[in-house]
Amino acid sequence: MARVSLDGIRKVYGSTEVIKGVDIDIADGEFCVFVGPSGCGKSTLLRMIAGLEDISGGTLTIGERVVNDLPPKDRSIAMVFQSYAIFPHMTVRENLAFGLTIAKAPKAEKDAKVAEAARILKMEHLLERRPSQLSGGQRQRVAIGRAIVRHPGVFLFDEPLSNLDAALRVDMRMELAKLHADLGATMIYVTHDQVEAMTLADKIVVLDAGVVQQIGSPLDLYHRPANLFVAGFIGSPKMNLLEARVEGVDATSVKLASADLGTLVLPRANAAVSRGDEVVVGLRPHHLGTSGSQQIGGKVKLVERLGNETLAALTLASGQQLIAALPGDVDVSIGEDLRLAPQPERASLFLSSGAAVN
Amino acid sequence: MASKFTRSNRIGWLMAGPAALLIAVFVVLPFIFAIGLSFTNQRLISPNPTEFVGLANYEQLLGIGMLTLEPERDASGAVLRDADGAPKYPTLRSVTRNNPDLPQFAGMREWFSFQLGEHPTYVLARDVVFMKAIVNTFIFVLVVAPVQAGLALVLALLINQRLRGINLFRAIYFMPVVVSIVVVSLLWRFIYDGSSGLLNNLLGALSFGAFPKIDWLGNPSTALGAIIAMSIWQAVGFHMVIWLSGLQTISPSLYEAAAIEGSSKWQVFRYVTWPGLRNTAVLILIVITMQAFALFSQIDVMTGGGPLDSTQTIVFQAVERGYGKQDISGGSTISVILFVIVFSISLIQRYLTREKQ
C-alpha cells in the first residue's frame, strides 16, 4: 500500500516536451484514472511512474521514497499492459510465478502465492493452460494475477480493457472495481474511455497535450468541468457548447443572449462576468427536456432511438448542432421543428478563453 | 471490386506458369532423372547402351566390411612369429585380391584399422574416398551448424539495438553474403597462403615471429578447419538477418513486463528472447544444415578435395564423378544418397524441435 505523488513531473524527447510539469497526489488505496485523448501523454506518465521511461524533471514519490532513479522492480509497483504481455510459452502457473522464479523464491512460497492470486481471480482451473488456450478476458486476468503475486504498493493499468470486446469489457470493469475493493491497494489506471474513467475512479485526472486539465471525482468533473476541454471530454453524448453574449449580470443571475438561445437566464450568484462578455454556455444533452419556461428551437436532423432514451440532433438558427437525450421513446421525426427546454441551474458557463466561470 | 485478375483461376495458373515450368524442367525433372540413372550404368558419353544394374551403384559406394585377421599358423597349429616374436599376419591384399574364400571383401580397400583384442581389425570400404567425403561433410555440418547459428545470434542481438549508425554495422556484417562465394574463396586462398598469406603474417606479427608459418590449405590437418572457418564467416550475416527478423517479432511489452519483474539481462534472454525465437531457431538450423551438406564451391576453388582427400565432400564427389570421370550414374547415386541424408536429418530436426503439447 502506498501513496503516490508527482511533483512537477516533466518528460522531454529531444526538443519536444510531452509532459509539461504535472502535479498529482494519489492517496493510499485510491483508484486514480488518467484519462485523455490519444497522444495526451497519459501512457507516458504511467510508464514514467513504472520506471519504463526516464523522468526528465520533477520528483516522483511512491510510499515515502523518491523513486526517480530506481529501477522498476524496486518501486513497489506492478503493471498490467494493454497487450497483456503474458509469456506465450509458459503456462498460466508459470506466468503467475514469473517474478518469484527469477527471484529464485522457494517452491512452497511460489505455490502459495500463485494459489492465492488464482483464488482471488477465480482461475484455479486455468493454471496448467497455455495463453494460446485462453480467451482475451482470461489472458488479461492472468496479467492481473501476475501483478497480484507481486504484492505491490501500487497497481498500474495501461488501457487493460482496450483489447477486449464490449460485453467482456463491462464484466472486467466490474471485476476490477471489486478487485480494488478487495485488495484496497492504490491503483493508477490509464484509459481513453471516459465510461471506464467515470465508473472505476475515485479520482480522475484529465490530461490534454501533456498538461493536467482537471483533477477531481467523477461527478465533480461531470457537473463542474474546469474548462471547455473537460466539458467536451467527459460525458456522452458530449456537452453542447453554445456561444452567447452576456446581456446583464446581477447578484443572483446572469442573462445571456444569442441567435440560438434567444435569451437565457442562468440563476448564478456573483458570476465573474460583465455585460458584453463573449461566453460559452454548456448544456448537457441529458439536461434538455421538452417542457420548461425557457426554450431553444431547432429543426430535427437525426433521431437515434436507443429504447431507454431518444437522441435527437437539432440544427439551430446559426446552423450549429444541438444534441438532446430525451428520456424514453419520444415521438419526434426528422425535419420536424422541436423546442427544447434547458435546465438553467445545471448549465455550465465558460469564458471565451475556455476557463469555467464559477 | 473483385477484378477478373483475383477471381480467375486460369489467370493465376498463367502467372505462376513460367516459374512452375522452370522449376519443373530444372529441378523436378533432373531429380527424377537422378533417381532413375542411379540404377543404371549410364555414362556421360559412351557408345555402349545403357543397362539396368539394380543397386550395384549403391553397393559400390556404400559397401563396407569388417575383417579381423587371424595370425598365420604352421601345420601343428602354432602361431608363426617374426624375428621380434610378434605374430605374423597375412597381408590385406591376400584377402581382398583374388581370394575365392572371401568373395565379400573382393576389391575393397582399407578405410581405417584398430586393434581389437590381440588381433588387428580392418574396416574395409569399397570406395574409401567417398567414405572420407561423407565423414568430412558430417564434420563440416556438425561444426558449422551450431557455430554459425550461435555466432549469427550473437551478432543479431548486438545489432538489434537503437544506436546511431547501427545500419552501418548491419551492412558490414551482411556484406560477405552479397559477394559471390567463388570470389570469397579466391580471396581467402590468399589469406590462407602458406608463405605470404595475410593470416600467417598476422599471426607472425602478433607473436613477434614465434608462430610458425602454416600452409593452411596444403596441410591435411588444417585444410578442412580453414574451409570451415571461412564458410562460417561468409554466411553468418545471412542468418544474422533471419535471427534479427525473429527478434523483432517479439513484443516489446514482454520485455517491459520482464523489466518490471526485475529480470537480469540473462534472465530476459532465457525467459523472453530465446522462447520467442523458437520457430526462427528451427528454420535457421534446418537451412544451415541443408546449406552445409551442399558444400562444394569452396572446395572446388580452394583445395579440389585435397590434400590427401582431407577436404573431399559429398557434393564435390558427385560433381567430380559425374563430370570429371563422366560417370553420370555414379554422380546421380551420390546425389540420391545426399538427398536421403538431408531429408532424414531435416525430419529428425523437425521432430526434435516440434511444439510439445
Image (cartoon, helix red, strand yellow):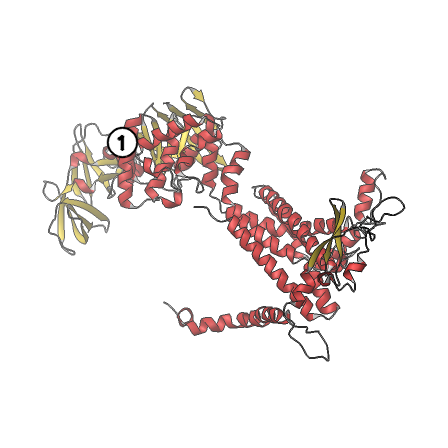
Q: Nearer the viewer, residue A271 or B47?
A: B47
Direction from residue A191 to residue A245 in the image, left or right: left
Q: Residue furthest front?
A: B76
Image coords of residue B229 (percent x, y): 71, 48
Disc 1 marks which amino acid? Answer: Lys
Residue toward you, B165 or A18: B165
Reply above or below: A68 against B231. Answer: above
Q: Is residue A198 visible?
A: no
Q: What residue is drawn where x is 82% and y is 56%?
A: B91
The residue identified by callout 1 is: A178
What is the secondary structure assignment of the residue under circle 1? helix
Where is residue B155, by image quadrant? top right
The quarter of the image holding the C terminus of chain A is top left
Specify the subunit that label 1 lies on: A
Specify the farthest residue to the top: A64
Q: Position of residue A132 (x, y in %)?
A: 39, 45
Q: Position of residue B168 (x, y in %)?
A: 63, 47
